[in-house]
Image (cartoon, rainbow, N blue to C red):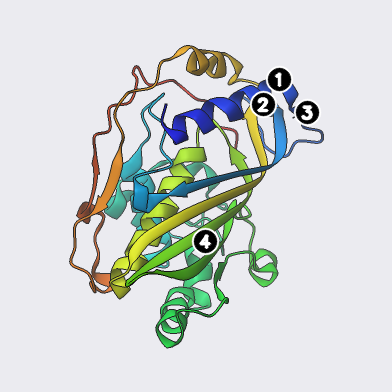
Amino acid sequence: MRKADKIFIDNINNIMNNGVWSENARPSYKNGKTANSKYITGAFAEYDLAKGEFPITTLRPIAIKSAINEIFWIYQEGSNELKTLVNNRGVHYWKDWEVGDSGTIGQRYGATVKKYDIINKLLAGLKKNPWNRRNIINLWQYEDFEETDGLLPCAFMTMFDVRRVGDTLFLDATLTQRSNDMLVAHHINAMQYVALQMMIAKHFGWKVGKFFYFVNNLHIYDNQFDNAKELLNRIPSDKNPILKLNVPDGTDFFKIKPEDFELIDYEPVKPQLKFDLAI
């Protein structure tokens, strides 16, 4: 069994069997009911991308195109505008987190990236000294939270390290997430940050190395328990999905396009499951 599918199954079992119930839960379902969940803390996974280990499950279809387009919206465009995301990227699910009638998600995510010029600073730091231990993206900015309302970032910190093996340079990445919906968003978030890692590696002509994924609160909502049981009864595909970035080494980060990505050998188990999101 592929690593991603085993980790998915193990996490579901761990949450359902050993997880504890949320208390004073913030989110609610669209019908107004409080969205309680069972959760575990301190979930960690490691994938060696160079060996073909990618964090995408085959137990259900993952909307990889939308996931990658969201990353471009945040880190290449530096935008928080929903109109841009919907019209230019074809991603609609962020509408539920619109702040009032602003047409935005508030001073969050892409707006934070743009305000602090995060990507240009990151690329400049990696160019100046690939070996330093300060190549960090941090979206947890209290000044931004005080500026507007909005969902506080879930995937909020990413750290990058360069590692030499023989004559080859590898770019490793660590994604830290405060909270994650195991059944809906886990592999979406993981794969989109792998895509970001690949874009940065291509910018410098490096190889992608390891991807480390830490989630502080990993949960399954109480309206997803039947879906959890269904997923545990499915048999994973025997294929090994690989994400490729089809641009030459040295391609400028800002010149890469979503369509340059290709997910090959991805044959997930169907049908897709229906999930009512907690907002």
Q: Amino acid at mark 4?
A: Tyr
In the image, residue 135 above or below residue 95: below
Contact? badges 4 and 1 (CB < 8 Å): no
Taking the spot 66% from the left edge, 32% from the top edge, the residue there is 28
Q: Residue at x 39, y 66 (%)?
A: 170
Please state which of the two labelled residues, at mark 4 or mark 2, is closer to the viewer.
2
Q: Which numbered dot is residue 109?
A: 4
Residue 140 lies, in percent from the top left, at 64, 64
Which type of secondary structure does the marked residue at label 1 adopt? helix
The mark found on residue 14 in the picture is 2
Does the CB distance between marks 3 and 2 fall below 8 Å?
Answer: no
Q: Nearer the viewer, mark 3 or mark 4?
A: 3
Q: Amino acid at mark 1?
A: Asn
Give the farthest residue toward the bottom.
128
Measured as percent of width and height from the top left, residue 24 is found at 81, 36
Q: CA distance from mark 3 to mark 4?
A: 29 Å
Q: Looking at the picture, how far across and down is residue 58, in whole percent?
A: 38, 28
Tell me which label, 4 or 1, sits earlier in the chain.
1
Question: From the image, which quarter does the N terminus lie in?
Answer: top left
Residue contact between numbered discs 2 and 1, judged by CB atoms under 8 Å: yes
Q: What kind of residue is marked 2?
A: Asn
Residue 189 versus residue 229 in the image, above or below:
below
> For mark 3, what is the residue?
20
From the image, state whether disc 1 or disc 3 is nearer to you.
Answer: 1
Q: Nearer the viewer, residue 58 or 276?
A: 58
- Residue at mark 2 to residue at mark 1: CA–CA distance: 5 Å
Task: Provide the secondary structure element on which disc 2 rests.
Answer: helix
Front residue of this view, candidates 182 and 165: 165
- Which residue is label 1 attached to? 17
Tell me the SS state at disc 3. Answer: strand
Q: CA distance from mark 4 to mark 1?
A: 34 Å
* Residue shown at 38% from the left, 21% from the top: 272
